[in-house]
Image: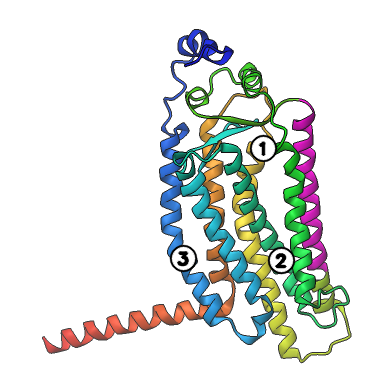
Amino acid sequence: MEETPLSVYYQTVYLTKCPYTQESIFSSVQFLTYFSRIIALLSFPIQLLTAYCIWKRTPDNMKSVKASLMNLNFWCTVSLIASSFFMCPYLFFPYIAGFNAGVLTDLNVPTVVQFYISFSISFAMIVSMVLVFESRSSSISQNRFRIKTTSGRLIWTSLNFFGLIGLLIPILFDLPDQINAKMNILKTIPCPTIEFFTQPVLVLASEGFWETYDKYACITMYIGLTSEVLFFTSCCIYYLFISKNIQVSCQTRRLQIRCFYGIVLQTLIPVCLTFIPLTVSMNHSKGEEYNQPETNMVFITLCLQNSATSLSILIVHQPYRRFLKTKLWCKKKKISKIVHVSSHSL
């Protein structure tokens, strides 16, 4: 190890005062990579089934949201595979620092490039979730705020995606001095896991301006995306439940309401799954005790969120749920007939 302040700290402080840092298996890189990849392998068939149901089993009354549901399931699948196999970030919360333990690291792809790819995929998935609400809102013909053209929707989607990317570009192109940034982290986290010293840890923002900028950039993203979801939801509520200017049949309106309920539920299920652990982890102050197992569990929960989103599409929407029940029921009936014939022949 090159003679740097970091290597001196490792030799004189870490090895003598932090002998039990890696005792927990839950804090290890192996636990993070193996568990996240198991989740991805188990989830992939579900996501393929979801894609099939959306493509082949979407009824006419849900055609307006078919493309957005397919888009959401696609980005959930890409996000899960990318985060579990290709990147697999190992982070040191509450600091904006970490390294990747996936295939791209084995291929010597720079960590900053991997983080940029990871952010891009995550933003695409988040925008896809908002797009589902926009599609449901714009499918209501009476809605004066609906986006009427494909080009208009493409412009809206692009503005959202590149707006999110644009907020983080300044951080990625003005990285702090890595040795000094890591030494600052060690002042409040004196005994991180050994990977902090042995792996190519990247500190995206050190204390000061850029850390404050990152905080307010995240707040801006949250407020902006939440405002859009609330706006589209409000449009749906008004035109489906309040407005007296009804230009569709009661049956069509009932189907539209059912689809709207399904979209809300399919979003709430994965959001609730991740909101509590993510909030608890992000709200840790830098003076509190360092907890790497908790950070790893938050990442695993985020992996589960991707699969939960796809699974919730299957469970919540009645056409897909009915299709699954039909297939399972037919399979049970076939098994029952085989057993019945066999026992009768005996």
Relative depth, front residue between 230 and 107: 107
Amino acid residing under circle 1:
Met
Q: Secondary structure at mark 2?
A: helix
* Separation (CA) of disc 2 from disc 1: 26 Å
Q: Position of residue 296 (x, y in %)?
A: 52, 38
Mark 2 vs 1, N-terminal side: 2
The answer to whether residue 162 is above or below residue 235 is: above
Foreground: disc 3 or disc 2:
2
Residue 286 falls within the magenta-colored stretch: no
> In terms of image quadrants, where is residue 147?
bottom right
Residue 224 position within the rendered picture, expressed as x and y whole percent measured from the top left? 80, 53
Q: Do the CB atoms of the residues marked 1 and 3 lie less than 8 Å apart?
A: no
What's the residue at 83%, 64% (across, down)? 231
Taking the image as shown, residue 131 lies to the left or right of residue 305, namely right
Q: Is residue 324 above or below residue 88?
A: below
Residue ID at (26%, 86%): 337
Looking at numbered disc 2 in the image, what kind of residue is underneath it? Leu
Q: Secondary structure at mark 1?
A: helix
Q: Quadrant of residue 203?
A: top right
Question: Image quarter for residue 266?
Answer: bottom right
The magenta stretch is 208-234
- Circle 3 sits on which residue? 46
Residue 282, numbered label:
1
Q: Residue sitting at 52 percent across and 65 percent down?
A: 311
Q: Residues within 10 Å of mark 3 (few under 14, many from 20)?
A: some
**Mark 2, residue position:** 131
Q: Which residue is outermost to the top?
A: 12
Q: Amino acid at mark 3?
A: Ile
Q: Is residue 173 above or below residue 35?
A: above
